[in-house]
Image (cartoon, rainbow, N blue to C red):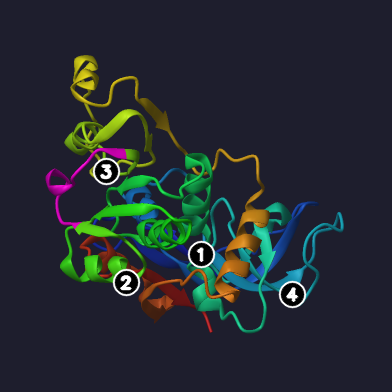
Amino acid sequence: MRALKPTGRADVTVGFAEVEQPRPGPGEALVKVEAFSLNRGETFQLEAPGPGWRPGKDVAGLVVQAAADGSGPGVCRRVVGHPPAGGWAEYVCVPTTSLAEIPDELDSVRAAALPLAGLTAVRLLRTAGALAGRRVLLTGASGGVGHYVTELAAAAGAELTVVTASPERGRSLAALGAAEVVHELAAARGPYDLVLESTGGPDLALALARLARRGTLIWFGQASRTPATLDFFGFFAGPESATLRHFHYADSDVPDGVDLATLVRLVGEGRLTPEIGRVAPWTETAAVLTDLRERRIRGKAVLTLA
């Protein structure tokens, strides 16, 4: 089968190769990929790929071989999946615990935009707890996670302030329910009961300083790729006795497939709207990756194999 593999080059990071079609294990289904989406984290991994690694964690397609142990969707069922890797290919094996069926009215392009960003958003808000009436600050809100968090948190009753450098992005987040949009963190007016921080570097300390006494900051990313430094005594300036919590979306007691089914249901009910920035044939993946790295794409980039 054809698959996209890392090239190890900085200019063109992926290229096509002929590889052996994967063989599913007992708890895996073989999925014929119809669409996959790109994640910024994968663009980072492509800069220094590990041996044998192939990208692809967000896919939608058709089950062509059901799991041998009888778990999961049957043959010819349309699915959205979150494999550990290898999804930028004609076929991929996906654990049945990381699959959810999709209805006919949900096309593969929108379904493929759900997994990593949607799972992160749902689990981040589950970690945060009840949101109704709470003042919430979300940094780094320009990406797919920011889109989903904004839509879900606003619907849950949060008074949400989002930080995005893009005025266009700010307008779209306001339309999704953000109560306030600021274009730099210094302009955010606290205190906030909850801070969801994803940029790291100096922004972590700035965000923490806007936290209310005994508030909670959940650190779920480091998009700046810059380590953060905190001063213990800085907590006494406002966020005294605050909780600082690390978050990783994969550390979940709820299987991926269950949360994916929730995301699919929310889309079907009109309560969640996948944002597609660009749709292109998978032959253009390398060029789309370049645009993604240079931030010329707002919303999810989805590649189609049809």
Mark 2 residue type: Ala
Question: Nearer the viewer's eye, disc 4 or disc 1?
Answer: 1
Is tag 1's residue or tag 2's residue first in the polypeptide sequence?
1
CA–CA distance between discs 4 and 1? 18 Å
Is 244 a magenta residue? no
Residue 74 on image: x %, y %: 81, 69
Q: Residue furthest front?
A: 133
Q: What stretch is highlighted in magenta?
A: 182-192
Is tag 3's residue or tag 1's residue first in the polypeptide sequence?
1
Residue 290 on image: x %, y %: 26, 65
Mark 4 residue type: Arg
- Residue 56 visible, this angle: no
Mark 3 residue type: Thr
CA–CA distance between discs 3 and 1? 21 Å
CA–CA distance between discs 4 and 2? 35 Å
> What is the quadrant of residue 9 in the picture?
bottom left
Question: Nearer the viewer's eye, disc 3 or disc 2?
Answer: 2
CA–CA distance between discs 1 and 2? 20 Å
Is tag 4's residue or tag 2's residue first in the polypeptide sequence?
4
CA–CA distance between discs 3 and 4? 38 Å
Residue 217 on image: x %, y %: 35, 34
Q: In this view, does 83 lie above or below 34?
A: above
- The reply, left or right, for residue 63 in relation to residue 234 is right
Q: Name the residue under label 3.
A: 199
Is tag 3's residue or tag 2's residue first in the polypeptide sequence?
2
The answer to which of 79 and 306 lies nearer the viewer is 79
Which residue is pictured at 18% across the width and 22% down the height?
237
Q: Name the residue under label 2.
A: 175
The numbered mark at residue 114 is 1
Is 189 a magenta residue? yes
The numbered mark at residue 77 is 4
